[in-house]
Image (tube, rainbow, N blue to C red):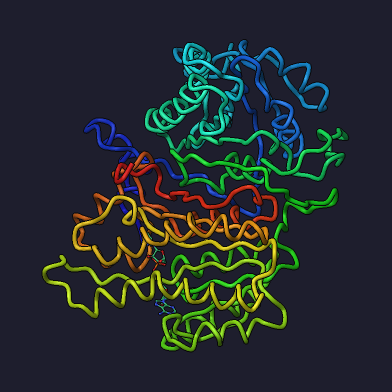
Amino acid sequence: MNDSYLNFVNSPLGARVARSLRWPLPEVLRRYRADTPEFDGIVAVGAGPSPQLLDALADVIAHIGMTSVAHAGASAWVPLANRHGLMTGRFEPADPAAHSQAGSQARVRALVFDASGIEDSAQLDTLYAFFHDALRSLDKCGRIVVLGRPPEACASPRQWTAQRALEGVTRSLGKEARRGITSNLIYVADGAKSGAKSGATSSAGNSNDAGIPSGIESTLRFFLSPRSAYVSGQVVRIGTAPSALGDDFDWTQPLAGQRAVVTGAARGIGAAIAHVLAAQGAHVTGIDVPAATDALDATMRQISGTALPFDIAAPETPAQIAAALDELGVDVFVHNAGITKDKTIAKMSEPAWRNVIDINLSAQERIDDALLEAGTLRDGGRIVCVSSIGGIAGNLGQTNYAASKAGVIGRVQSMAPHLAKRRITINAVAPGFIETQMTAKMPLAIREAGRRMNSMSQGGQPVDVAQTIAWLAHPGSAGITGQVVRVCGQSLIGA
Ligand code: NAD
C-alpha cells in the first residue's frame, strides 16, 4: 500500500511543513537492490576492554569490502585490521556545527562495538565514550551493531549483569538515532566466531582462526546490509552449532541448489518471501488455497517455481505436501500463511476462534510432523515461521490471532532443542505493521497509528520480512535457533 504521508514529507515542500510543525519525518529507507553495491562506505569500530570478536569482525569487513576507522577506545583494531588487509584509520567525529564533511571525517555507514570483554557494569563507560563521540557521524539509514556474550553463559553475576545491560543501550540507541538507522545486539557464544570453514582463506588473502565451528558472518552481513532496513531493536543469539560453508561459498547465491517451500505464497509477504528465496538461488514451491490458484501460478511463473494449490488446514494436506516433495526433499520450509478474524472475545464466534488457531498454528504443527516423520525436511534444514507482534503484545479484538501467533513462538522455542539433533534450525519472525492487503483492511486511524508508532515512523514492506527470513534460512545461520526476530521498525507495541 502507498504511504502518502511518507511521500509528502520527503518532498521539498512537505519536508518544510513537517519540520515547522514538528511532525515525524520518516526517512525513505535504503533497501537492498541488486543493481547497487550491498556494502560500501566506512565502519567505525569501538570496543570495551579485552574485546574478543575483533578478529572475526575484521574478517567479515574484509570479505564485504568496507573500509574501517577505529575509535580511540579500540586501539587493538588498527594493527589487527592491517593484518586482514583492511583499509583503516583513526575515527574522527563529524563536526556538527560545520554541516559539511570539511575538517572532519566523512559520515560512516555503520558503528560496530565489540562489548564481548565487558565483565563489570563500570566498564559500560566504554559504550558511552564510543557512541557519545560517534552517533552524530552515522549516516542516515546507517547501522549500529553491538556484539556481546550471552548473559546466561557468563561466568559471574557481574559479567551477566553488564552483558544484559547491553540490551538497554542498544535499544535506546535505535530510538535516539532515528533517520532510518537500525540498532541491534548480537550475543555471540564463545566458539561461534567465523562463518567459513576453519583455515578458509578470505578474499583479502587472510586465514580465519583455526578450529572455529560456526559463524557470525551471515548475521553480521545481514545487520550491516540494507536487507535489514526494517529490523531494529533486536537481540539475536548465535550459538556454536557448526556451519559448513566451503572456501568457495557464493555469498550472492547462498541458497543455490536448495529447495524451499513457502505457504501463503500467492500474494503479500508470502509472495515476497518466494521472490527473495528464489533470487538467492533456491527452487521455490509455493502453497496457497485453491481459490488463489491464479495468483499463485502467476507468482511461481515469475520465479520459475512450482505451485501447489493446497489448503494447509485440510486434514489430508500434510501427507499430500510430503508426497509432492518427497523425492527431492526440502531444505527450507517457511510457514507464512495466516488469516485474521477479528472480534472481541464476547462477540467472536467459535468457528472464527477455531479457524484462526487451526490455520495459523495447528496446521504448522501437523505439516512439520509429517515432513519430519517422512524425512522430507533434510537434516541441516531450516524452518522459519511467521508470528506477529500481536502474539507478543496481544491486541484488542485479536484473542484468537494473538493466541495463534504466541503459540508459534512457543513452537519454535520448544522444537529447537529437539530439531538440533538433526541440525535443523527453527526460528520465527514477528512482523509489526507491514504494508499488505491484510493491513489495508484496517480502519484508517488504527492503520496510521500502526505506521507511525515505531522508530522508523513508517510501515515495513513485505520484502523486509522476506529478507529477514532469507537470513535465517541461510546455510551460515546454523547457530541461530529457537529465536524470534521482530521485523517492526522497533515498534513501541510490545517493546
Ligand atoms: P495476506 O492475507 O496478504 O496473505 C496471506 C496468504 O496466505 C494469502 O495468499 C492466503 O490465500 C494464504 N492463506 C490463507 N489461509 C490459507 C490456507 N488455509 N492454506 C493456504 N494458504 C492460505 O497476508 P500477509 O499480510 O501477507 O500476511 C502473511 C503472514 O504474515 C501471516 O501469517 C500474517 O499473520 C503475518 N503478519 C502480517 C502482518 C502485516 O502487517 N501484514 C503483521 C504481522 C504478521
Relative to residue 315, is residue 446 drawn left or right? left
Relative to residue 489, is residue 36 drawn left or right? right
Q: Position of residue 153 (x, y in %)?
A: 56, 33
Relative to residue 349, is residue 453 drawn left or right? right
Q: Is residue 164 above or below residue 346?
A: above
Which of 371/154 is in front?
A: 154
Residue 424 visible in the displayed image? yes
Q: Position of residue 452 (x, y in %)?
A: 29, 45
Q: Is residue 367 above or below residue 487?
A: below
Which of 359/287 is in front?
A: 359
Q: Quadrant of ligand 1?
A: bottom left
All told, the count of numbered labels is 0
Which of 180/188 is in front?
A: 188
At a point 38% along the width and 28% down the height, the residue shown is: 176
Q: Quadrant of residue 299?
A: bottom right
At a point 44% along the width and 50% down the height, the residue shown is: 487
Q: Position of residue 152 (x, y in %)?
A: 51, 34
At a point 33% along the width and 38% down the height, the residue shown is: 25
Q: What quarter of the picture does the N terminus occupy?
A: bottom left
Residue 98 visible in the displayed image? no
At a point 44% along the width and 87% down the height, the residue shown is: 315
